[in-house]
Image (tube, coloured by chain):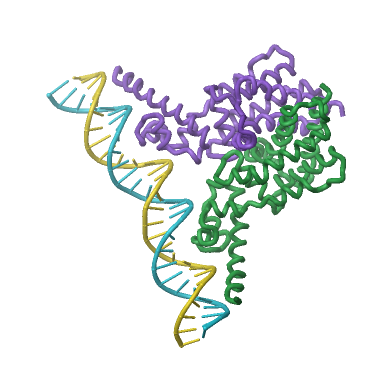
Chain colours: A green, B purple, C yellow, D cyan
Amino acid sequence: MRQIADANAASEQTRSRLLEAAREVFSQRGFQGATVREICRRAEANGAAVNYHFGSKDGLLAEALNFAPLAALQKANANECPSTRLRLFIRDFMMMLLDEKNPSSQCRIMARELADPTSALDKIVREAIAPLHEFLGKLLREIIGEKVGAADLRRCVYSILGQCLFYRHSHPVLQRLHNTLRYDHKEIEAIAEHIVEFSLAGIKHLSKK
Amino acid sequence: MRQIADANAASEQTRSRLLEAAREVFSQRGFQGATVREICRRAEANGAAVNYHFGSKDGLLAEALNFAPLAALQKANANECPSTRLRLFIRDFMMMLLDEKNPSSQCRIMARELADPTSALDKIVREAIAPLHEFLGKLLREIIGEKVGAADLRRCVYSILGQCLFYRHSHPVLQRLHNTLRYDHKEIEAIAEHIVEFSLAGIKHLSKK
DNA sequence: TTTACTTTCAAACAAGCGTTTGATACGCTT
DNA sequence: AAGCGTATCAAACGCTTGTTTGAAAGTAAA
């Protein structure tokens, strides 16, 4: 059994190097734009390694996805009041989306999938996006009260997510528009604060109508 | 000269067929995902037609872009009050983005470019997106007054654009999330109305702080 | 040492891509 | 009718892609 154990240990190293490299490249270039060869080069692995360990490029993407960090965000701060939980969630979500130092490139991969679906999108929607929408829906319901209809509530969720994702999706554009752009910690917090203020006002306006 | 005139007339037909097919395919599959062969097939043209008429796939994209409809939106309704102009702009912008019957697939191509830049992005930013941001910035300034700083104002522009673009970018996801989704005229107007109400509340909240 | 098994590797594969080529057909001028 | 310029076409080119292959290397049990 030592044979298998050691072999697995060595194998696991290249496996995890491949996964890490894949997350980087997928989040930078998208699934279509990413090449197996670049992933293998960054992982310092042979070009056949991806197919050996994961069967295919699709299989690599499926295993590279990890929804735990996003799910953790939703379970945190459960004892705070609704609007505080919204505030904290948006801040942490924006950190995930924008902070280059954040190891969780998961959200960036997922954000790319939105515009350019692959075979993995069904799994992403089922396991990550649907729970996220549900979480935000329930949270907003606590803030907004029972008077607002389901369609309006859902559109509020969309308004918040739209604002958040804009900074990620439009990053190449915003960089060209004013080239001093840099997403450091302070800037991200300011963005998150704006989204919270802007959205809470929008939400409360709807509940008063 | 008749030679040239008739030749041009025949040539122009395939040229415009290619442009139309290109707009369809680019907006559906993105620039990377679109293939010259499919564009030519849809245009019922030979596979070499793109390179003959436009030099390259990049050249085809550059000529397929047409910013006039988006620019027209910004010049319309100049005699209305600021918040009405915002309301009308958002409605027409959403129609451009979502209405399948709308012949202007330009915005859909541009929306794809945001997430996945190509060589055409510089031109798009310069000639379409930068003017759009400037337009919205000035419009919001009229609504919001002079007390709000430039950074906050810009973030309000981002909040509005983010909400609008979300429906386009996330369309594949929203379709999977609840499969009764359909963007008919009435639904698009309801979405636009929500974005306007939501955003005006957010804006006014900022100007009161 | 032999054997069995897993992992790595360079090389090649088939398929698809954007693009180029040379021939062909057509319309016009001379 | 001959010559010229343009548009179209099937075919092929060179390149990159994801994937496959068969040999080599390494490790541990027999």
Q: Is there any visible trace of residue B138 in the rendered image?
A: no
**Quarter where residue B204 is shown:** top right
- Image position, residue B57 (x, y; %): 45, 37
Q: Which residue is nearer to you in this view: A24 or A51? A: A51
As displayed, is residue B63 above or below residue A132?
above
Quadrant (top left, top right, bottom left, bottom right) of the N terminus of chain A: bottom right
**Quarter where residue A196 is shown:** top right
Q: Residue at x 61, y 66 (%)?
A: A13
Residue placed furthest toward the top: B79
As displayed, is residue B193 above or below residue D12?
above
Q: Which residue is nearer to you in this view: A138 or B111? A: A138
Q: Residue at x 69, y 34 (%)?
A: A162
**In the picture provided, is A52 more to the left or to the right than A165?**
left
- Image position, residue A21 (x, y; %): 60, 57
Q: Residue at x 58, y 61 (%)?
A: A43
**In the picture provided, is B170 more to the left or to the right than A148?**
left
- Image position, residue A152 (x, y; %): 74, 27
- Image position, residue A92 (x, y; %): 77, 46
Q: Which residue is nearer to you in this view: C4 or B36? A: C4
